[in-house]
Amino acid sequence: MSIFRSLTNRIFFGSALLAVGAIAIAIYNVNVAVTRQAEDELRRGLDEAGTIIEEYRHVLVDHFTREARLIADLPRLKAAVDTNDPKTVQGLAEEYQRQLSADLLSVTGRDGRMLAQITSASASTGSYDALPGVKAAALGRESSSFWPHPGGILQVVTVPIWIDPQHPEILGTLSVGVSLDSGAANRFRSLTNSDIAFGIDGSIQASTLPQEVWPALVPLLVSSDLRQSVLVGAEDYIAKTRRLTTGLSPATSDGASNVTQTSGADATVVILRSRTQRLGFLNPLHGRLSIIAVVAVLAATLLSYAIARTVTRPLGAITATMREMAATGDLTRRIAAPPGGAAWEDEDARLLATTFNTMTDSIARFQREAGQRERLSSLGRLSTVVAHEIRNPLMIIKTALRRLRSPTVTSEELRAAVTDIDEETARLNRLVSEVLDFAKPIKFELAPTDLNALCEDAARAADSDGPAISIRLELDPAITTVVTDAERLRLALVNILTNARHAVAARSEAPNGKDPIRLRTRRQSPGRVAIEVRDQGTGIASDDLSRVFDPYFTTRRTGTGLGLAISKNIVEGLGGTIGVASRQGYGTEVRIELNDKV
């Protein structure tokens, strides 16, 4: 389509669609996530509420069961029950009921006759003469049961009153009850933030909801531990029904045979949470999100069009200039600044053109300065390398000439001096050639070499420079020959030994021992040999240790900083490794490891 041939239109439509799609997906995901989270929280809260109610009730029943067992075992109660006199038992029963704060406390005699019965105000309207647990307790078995009364449900724990549990003589029974009434429902509501209803035998006995809506809760009593929706009045509730267990635990480790869990009726608790109230915040939230989405889409559309216009207008001039730069290779070409006008896009184009022109001016200036710096740097590197590398051969030549000037020179010394001058002159020629090719890759000439002889030669060459400083040689006779470039490895060792001599000479006090420098060779492992140069010089500062192999880095006023850099290039080119360990004020060790065969 022709509408998409324009970069402006493509940017506009692409940005607008991306913005609209991102906003729509974000709003949808937010709505779904918030709704799902609210529903999940509602269900989790319902499950947690059921668990809290059951745990709280079990703790309460366990408490009353233990108290009932203790009271039934008291000698005073046993003596009073044994009289079978209601007046004697009534006083004790009232005292124990006050201590326990129980909603029911009743005592029967041997013949099952009621000797005492005390109830709280909430349970006073019920009839408890036919409690199902009394018969079981009269036979020596503890029991727990639920019993309805007009204000709620009573959970009753009944225990036998006997002389000796091993050879029981049943004196009577003791029943202790706790009421699940409207007060208990309100307490559970404060604990769980849920509405509570207690039911038994298909009817609601107590609830935190108004009594006129209780018939709507009756169908929930037939389910068990299931979440379901129910319409109560004008509100939608999610409800969970849990059957109540007696929760009676054995009195002893073998007491399972002494416990029976009778249930006069099926007791149920219904836990409800209003979905209408809990999820009521979602509708206003959805409305606000919809308004935000519409506004965001309109803003994104306008912004996309503005971005498209501002991007494409300045690109025309830049693109044309860059084509010319690519065709001519002239990186200093400038863009003609657009004329000033009322359109705000032109101001952006003018700023972009000005920035581009500033960049090209800087490139032109940097090109000129870089060319000058490169020429100066090349000249400096060449002069320092030549000065550094020819110094050692010149010192050998100087030493040979000194011997020649001696009036007592012998013919052998004359031939040795001439030979040294010839060798060092040839070496100087090679060094100049190598300096000129310093930037090029090193070409090695590998051949079998006597490593120990090479180290001795390097020590003599280094010893000819400066004051006499003893170099101790510890050469492993087991090392015969290695395949290497002897001349370049010798050059590396001379550089390292020269640095060691300078470090020893720079000490303010004499080093410990007769040999301040030690050159050692040894076999490191099968196929590897090591060369170690250890001195007792001034050492290297810890901050400088990582830079010792950098070209032109030196701490000596007259140093060039190329010695170790050249040595490192040579060793690594030969397939070896070189490392430095130093402690300022104590000395330095340089370690080279090479392969037997390259």
Image (cartoon, rainbow, N blue to C red):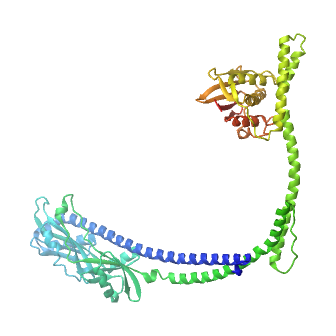
Number of callouts: 0
Q: Give how far across and how far down residue 204 sits, in percent.
A: 29, 83
Residue closest to the eye, 78 or 264: 264
Q: Quadrant of residue 385?
A: top right
Asked if 418 appears above or below 371 in the picture, the reply is above
Residue closest to the eye, 413 or 209: 413
Residue closest to the eye, 571 or 196: 571
Q: Give how far across and how far down residue 223 sits, in percent.
A: 29, 78
Is residue 551 visible in this depiction of the protein? yes
Q: Quadrant of residue 535?
A: top right
Asked if 386 appears above or below 115 in the picture, the reply is above
Q: Give how far across and how far down residue 370 sits, in percent.
A: 86, 51
Is residue 121 visible in this depiction of the protein? no
The N terminus appears in which quarter of the rendering? bottom right
Q: Is residue 291 left or right of residue 86?
A: right
Q: Give how far across and how far down residue 64 sits, in percent.
A: 26, 68
The C terminus appears in which quarter of the rendering? top right
> Residue placed at 34% from the left, 88% from the top?
213
Asked if 306 appears above or below 455 in the picture, the reply is below
Asked if 406 appears above or below 386 in the picture, the reply is above
